[in-house]
Amino acid sequence: MEKNIGLVLAILLVLAASSAAMTMAVEPSDCAGGACVQVGGGPEVMQASSPIMGTEYYAEIHGDYVAAGTSLRNEPWDLITITGVPGGATVVKAILVWNILEDSVSSGAVLVNGTLFEGTVIKTVSNPYCWSPSLSTTFAADVTGFVTGNGVYMISGYPTGVSDFSDPWSDSTPPLAEGASLIVVYENPSEPLRAVVDLGNEAADADHLISWASPAAGPVSAKNTWIVIDGQDNAANDVALFNGVAVAGPGSSLRAADAFPGADPRTGASSYGALWDTLTVDVSGLVAEGDTSASAGITASSDCIGFAGNVFSVTIGPGGAVGGQLVPAGQGGLSMLGVAALAAASVLVVAARLRR
């Protein structure tokens, strides 16, 4: 038996070292636009991510996430109310995502409860949202440490051409702040191990691949959040899709007329909705045990909408690492030896189990 354990250790250590070499072979140039992420928690390891929708954050953690948003159009500020973080849980990551329509990309400055953050440009595209500015830019900022759990968070300090809370259809002087969403990832030892995936890369109607490292485990519990730009309630028939199935909008029982009518809260007036949606849906029945990927999409009939981001979580089997972090393009990570050492530590756990 000891010989077998020794053989397993030797094989797995070789595989760990090979895996480290292959992972670190990714060059910073392959990670342009911030599309480098840590996978599986633990050490910071560069890995090229999807060019369609880039991973902002990935974690395997005993816990989950919550998300909420607000409209910002023609407003100097508005409020995001976070609920659903259990008592005793610890916030391990908080990410603010917002969108501005303008003719040139401005500063990504934003205030959260009066604290200034400089956002990172997730993507700038030619404006597809049927308003006059030529560009649409989605920003994100890591606001961890300033978001402690459930509560009300004031968002302000972003560019806006109008700040009197007026109806967007009465004055559309740019810049036009569309809305903002706050994603809060928490750790709670009493909850199952989950993979939490936050995707951010502005795009119009499309299906986006979601992938995670450890297979989904039963009983499967999964949810997905669509963060959608410029939804209006006078242009019905928007649909939220998960694995090709309508889960909101026509063809479903949730928001059956329109998945994205601009339903997020708004302090100011609006004739046709809040122009921002943060929609979370239970998709447990659409994820099978053993799955490591899924897709989320949106479609529109007459509305001009697009993804600002997508967040997903699913229960996974034991063995995942707690934590996770974005690795900026061109910045370090562990050496190959360091990655191999971490893998070796995992091998020792395997060996201990074999001895039982």
Image (cartoon, rainbow, N blue to C red):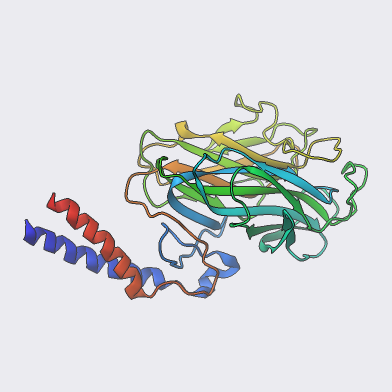
Q: As drawn, which residue projects farthest toward the right?
A: 170
Say which quarter of the image contains residue 217. top left
Q: Which residue is drawn at 81% across and 59% down?
A: 159
Give the side of residue 235 with respect to residue 188, left or right. right
Q: Is residue 246 above or below residue 149?
A: above
Q: In this view, does 343 lie above or below 354?
A: below
Q: Residue at x 18, y 51 (%)?
A: 353
* Residue 150 shows up from this direction: yes
* Residue 294 shows up from this direction: no
Say which quarter of the image contains residue 337. bottom left
Give the side of residue 79 with respect to residue 9, left or right. right
Give the side of residue 33 with respect to residue 321, left or right. right
In percent of width and height, residue 135 lies at 78, 59
In percent of width and height, residue 1 lies at 6, 56
Query: Which is nearer the eye, 117 or 134?
Result: 117
In percent of width and height, residue 279 lies at 63, 38
Say which quarter of the image contains residue 347. bottom left
Query: Which is nearer the eye, 96 or 311?
Result: 96
Query: Which is nearer the eye, 40 or 29?
Result: 40
Q: Which residue is drawn at 17% across and 66% down?
A: 10
Q: Residue at x 47, y 74 (%)?
A: 332
**How many numbered circles does the render carry?**
0
